[in-house]
């Protein structure tokens, strides 16, 4: 029955059948699966592009260098084959994992140039050694005279002294306390000596044993790396049986002439040191009678004197100051205890002394732990407001304040 007022509409039979069927629904999409599929597709496309077109930043040299021979500077240091062989023998003690990584060999391009891709890894110790200009090759003309065992240092005709000529140049900075460190006992152990020369900053002063083989070669190598140099004078200790100081030891009981003869022998073993320091010498330093002629000879030859480990006010120090020669005593011995923490404590004490007195000098022996800790300390000491300085600069600054 159709209600009044409504018009009936008839549906065509073919559409009526279709309308009777339920509508189809599209399948549901899993969004996680879709995202994963898109990522895989992008990776495949990127890999294919690299294989077809190549990655211009993944290969080829980082820079082009020219490897052409040039004339060597006449002042450049030389290394003998025996030194090279000795260094090579030392390298046998390293494991492969300890060898420093330096770079990669390149290829020869179409233009005939050797193209080298160099990649330097950071050093294991946390930073590269500061580059330094080499000091002039010794001996400098006019600063030597012939002696019975070789050349001896003298003051030049124009008044220039070896302590001035062979010191490392230095410009002090106002408001920054100066810190100097002397590392001694060098020349006997080739590995420790090489480590000190090559790894310590050039401001660190190095002192050498006069009995060392090839002493002049070591001095030349140190100066070529920017280090100023001291020569160690063996002096009589309180217990000669316990501390062997060698056949040329300066003795408290010897005559003036005997000590001067030994002194000249020691001084003639090399050239290029700006001053001397004592090796042992606790007994000799107590004798003003023995010290005075030795100090006078050192002053006449224009040398500085830095004492270590024998006290601040010994007869030797007093005579050196009385003679008017540049002189100072080390404020701290850094490695009385050969432990990293103990050395670090002494270096901190050295900083405190520098704050109080405007400068401080520390001294240590060429133990591996000493070289390692001094090197670590020196890398960031200037960031704390200090100035790392050669020992000669501290001597000059103290003399200026007197």
Image (cartoon, helix red, strand yellow):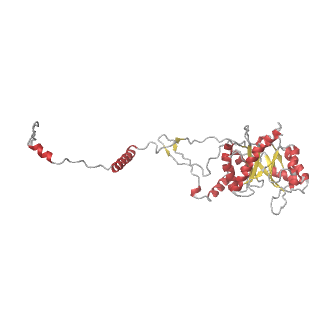
- Residue 383 locus on image (x, y percent): 66, 43
Number of numbered tags placed on the structure image:
0
221 left or right, relative to 398: left
Task: Tell me what residue is drawn at x 88 percent, y 56 percent.
Answer: 252
| Residue closest to the eye, 209 or 113 | 209
Relative depth, front residue between 81 and 39:
39
Picture coordinates of residue 95, whole percent (x, y): 59, 59
Residue 83 visible to the viewer = yes
Depth order, front residue of 283/179: 179
Q: Where does the image place residue 142, in percent across and percent down from the top left? A: 80, 40
Residue name at image x 64 percent, y 46 percent = 129
User: Hey, which residue is sitting farthest bottom in the picture?
Assistant: 241
Kindly indicate the quadrant of the structure image that contains residue 143: top right
Horizontal side of 393 relative to 119 (left or right) equals: right
Percent position (x, y) of residue 145? Answer: 82, 44
Residue 254 is left or right of residue 130, and the answer is right
């Amino acid at each position: 029955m159709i209600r009044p007022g409504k018009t009936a509409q008839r549906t065509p039979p073919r559409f009526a059948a279709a309308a009777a069927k339920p509508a189809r629904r599209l399948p549901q999409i899993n969004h996680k699966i879709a995202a994963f599929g898109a990522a895989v597709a992008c990776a495949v496309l990127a890999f294919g592009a690299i294989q077809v077109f190549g990655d211009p930043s993944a290969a080829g040299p980082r820079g082009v260098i020219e490897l052409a021979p040039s004339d060597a500077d006449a002042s450049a240091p030389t290394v003998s084959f025996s030194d090279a062989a000795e260094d090579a023998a030392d390298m046998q003690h390293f494991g492969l994992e300890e060898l420093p990584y330096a770079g990669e060999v390149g290829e020869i391009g179409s233009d005939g140039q050797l193209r080298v891709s160099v990649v330097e890894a950071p050093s294991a110790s946390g930073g590269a050694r500061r580059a330094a200009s080499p000091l002039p090759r010794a001996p400098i003309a006019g600063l030597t005279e012939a002696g019975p065992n070789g050349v001896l240092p003298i003051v030049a005709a124009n008044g220039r002294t070896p302590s001035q000529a062979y010191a490392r140049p230095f410009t002090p900075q106002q408001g920054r306390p100066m810190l100097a460190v002397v590392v001694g006992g060098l020349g006997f152990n080739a590995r420790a000596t090489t480590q000190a020369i090559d790894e310590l900053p050039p401001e660190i002063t190095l002192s050498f044993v006069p009995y060392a083989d090839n002493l002049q070669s070591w001095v030349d190598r140190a100066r070529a790396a920017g280090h100023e140099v001291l020569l160690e004078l063996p002096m009589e200790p309180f217990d000669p049986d316990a501390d062997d100081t060698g056949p040329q030891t300066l003795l408290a009981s010897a005559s003036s002439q005997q000590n001067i003869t030994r002194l000249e022998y020691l001084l003639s073993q090399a050239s290029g040191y700006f001053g001397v320091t004592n090796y042992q010498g606790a007994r000799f330093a107590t004798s003003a009678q023995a010290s005075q002629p030795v100090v006078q000879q050192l002053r006449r030859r224009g040398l500085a004197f830095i004492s270590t480990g024998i006290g601040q006010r010994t007869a030797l120090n007093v005579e050196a100051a009385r003679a008017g020669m540049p002189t100072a005593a080390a404020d701290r011995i850094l490695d009385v205890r050969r432990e990293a923490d103990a050395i670090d404590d002494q270096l901190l004490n050295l900083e405190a002394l520098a704050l109080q007195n405007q400068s401080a000098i520390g001294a240590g022996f060429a133990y591996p732990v000493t070289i390692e800790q001094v090197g670590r300390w020196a890398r960031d000491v200037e960031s704390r407001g200090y100035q790392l300085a050669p020992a000669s600069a501290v001597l000059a600054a103290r003399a200026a304040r007197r």
